[in-house]
């Protein structure tokens, strides 16, 4: 058996898609026979312009072979990202055709990796499985609608047709949020056989409480780590919150993205000096910063598509056993209310609500048992093991 796994991001790249794909690949590898092959077709690390890790074009680890494709730098610019993906897709399809696999897997935060999987499967006459990490048709149309209603409507219709074709012909579809199927069911897609294997807690974040170090408590550190993009909308809320809340609090932002410059301009415009932005770092350095934080921060822009998502950052944050202040709505807000007692959720973009949450969070405590139960339930390794079994079963069920 030969399987090809398309994933635009893979270890050692730093992003949710990379962490998920890497763990799933290991889980699949353990369940394959000695002579089976799992080929990962991915890119050289390119998620952040200021974080570049050298990696080989091809690496082998047991029955896993990782093929990395060089793509042009994009600096988070949309058109440059499109160019980079086209380079990846053409090279990935050519390699896949040469490998001539029996089964394909595509993990897609941006729809086109899924389309690449579906087109490759059609050309090679084999089955495929889609791991859906975002509703692209709704996300992209919501962003276009802010600029041009016609463009938003056309993009939504076009990308939904691609999604419909892709999902209807797949041997299996998995979603990372239970908010996704509702969207597609309302549009007439049968999701009754779809699976739900969410993101989870990576082993690197388990048991970190024992490493916590003493520090002076004069100023509270509120930390956010991850993408700084239009989806997070940090530029729309953090400078205003920082100005109101004053010097008793320090905001530490570790990451990069398309709105990094907008955030820096907003900080300058509000004339605040209690926000520090650092470039992306590897996980060991990130954990060191996490350990010195007092409060963890999360925010998603007020866009309809984001009411259905479940950010992977939630799982990472909960395992750190620190208070969480999150600007969320919809499914993710409900998930936090049901599963994370050490968090306060405010409405996205609500500056006063955010300030209130930060001041109130210090009085909220959660038991170690709450966190332990969460980690046990949402262990990434445990979830990916179950998902790997499900994918391999789906290879046999649907013709």
Image: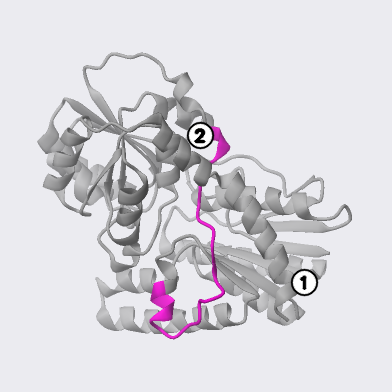
> Eyeballing the image, is 222 above or below 159?
above
User: Which of marks 2 and 1 precedes in the sequence?
Assistant: 1
Asked if the magenta segment contains residue 275, the reply would be no
178 with respect to 265 (left or right): right
Which residue occupies 28% across, 13% down?
Answer: 216
Residue 134 screen position, x and y as percent: 45, 64
63 with respect to 53 (left or right): right
Residue 284's disc is none
Which residue occupies 51% across, 46% down?
Answer: 377
Depth check: 355 or 226 in front? 355
> Which image quadrant: the C terminus?
bottom right
Q: CA distance from mark 1 to mark 2?
A: 38 Å
Instruction: Look at the image and name its color scheme.
Output: one colour
245 with respect to 161 (left or right): left
> Eyeballing the image, is 248 above or below 359?
above
> Which image quadrant: the N terminus?
bottom right
Residue where numbered disc 1 is placed: 97
Residue where numbered disc 2 is placed: 205
> Eyeballing the image, is 96 above or below 247?
below
Magenta stretch, residue numbers? 182-205
Which residue occupies 85% across, 55% down?
Answer: 33
Residue 75 screen position, x and y as percent: 44, 52
User: SS of the residue at dot 1?
Assistant: helix
Asked if the magenta segment contains residue 188, the reply would be yes
Depth check: 191 or 1 in front? 191
Q: Is residue 66 visible?
A: no
């Amino acid at each position: 058996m030969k399987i090809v796994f398309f994933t635009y991001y893979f270890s050692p790249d730093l992003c949710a898609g990379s962490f998920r794909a890497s763990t799933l690949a290991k889980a699949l590898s353990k369940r394959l026979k000695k002579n089976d092959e799992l080929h990962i077709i991915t890119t050289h690390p390119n998620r952040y312009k200021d974080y570049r890790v050298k990696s080989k074009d091809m690496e082998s680890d047991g029955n896993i072979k990782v093929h990395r494709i060089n793509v042009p730098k994009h600096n988070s610019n949309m058109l440059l990202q499109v160019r980079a993906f086209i380079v990846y897709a053409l090279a990935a399809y050519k390699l896949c055709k040469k490998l001539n696999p029996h089964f394909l897997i595509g993990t897609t935060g941006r729809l086109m990796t899924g389309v690449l999987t579906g087109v490759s499967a059609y050309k090679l006459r084999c089955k495929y499985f889609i791991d859906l990490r975002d509703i692209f048709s709704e996300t992209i149309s919501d962003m276009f609608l802010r600029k041009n209603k016609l463009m938003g409507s056309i993009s939504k219709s076009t990308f939904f047709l691609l999604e419909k074709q892709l999902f209807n012909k797949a041997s299996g579809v998995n979603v990372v949020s239970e908010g996704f199927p509702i969207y597609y069911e309302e549009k007439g897609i049968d999701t009754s056989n779809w699976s739900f294997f969410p993101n989870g807690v990576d082993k690197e974040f388990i048991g970190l409480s024992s490493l916590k170090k003493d520090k002076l408590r004069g100023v509270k550190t509120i930390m956010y780590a991850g993408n700084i993009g239009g989806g997070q909308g940090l530029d729309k809320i953090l400078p205003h919150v920082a100005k109101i809340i004053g010097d008793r609090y320090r905001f530490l932002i570790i990451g990069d993205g398309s709105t990094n410059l907008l955030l820096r301009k907003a900080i300058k415009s509000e004339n605040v000096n209690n926000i520090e932005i650092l470039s992306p770092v590897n996980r060991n350095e990130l954990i060191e910063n996490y350990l010195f934080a007092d409060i963890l921060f999360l925010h998603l822009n007020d866009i309809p598509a984001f009411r259905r998502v479940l950010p992977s950052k939630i799982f990472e944050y909960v395992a750190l056993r620190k208070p969480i202040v999150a600007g969320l709505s919809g499914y993710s807000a409900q998930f936090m209310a049901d599963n994370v007692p050490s968090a306060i959720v405010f409405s996205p973009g609500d500056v006063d609500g955010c300030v209130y949450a930060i001041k109130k969070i210090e009085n909220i405590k959660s038991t170690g048992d709450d966190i332990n139960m969460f980690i046990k339930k949402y262990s990434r390794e445990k979830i990916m093991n179950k998902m790997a079994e499900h994918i391999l079963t789906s290879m046999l069920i649907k013709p």
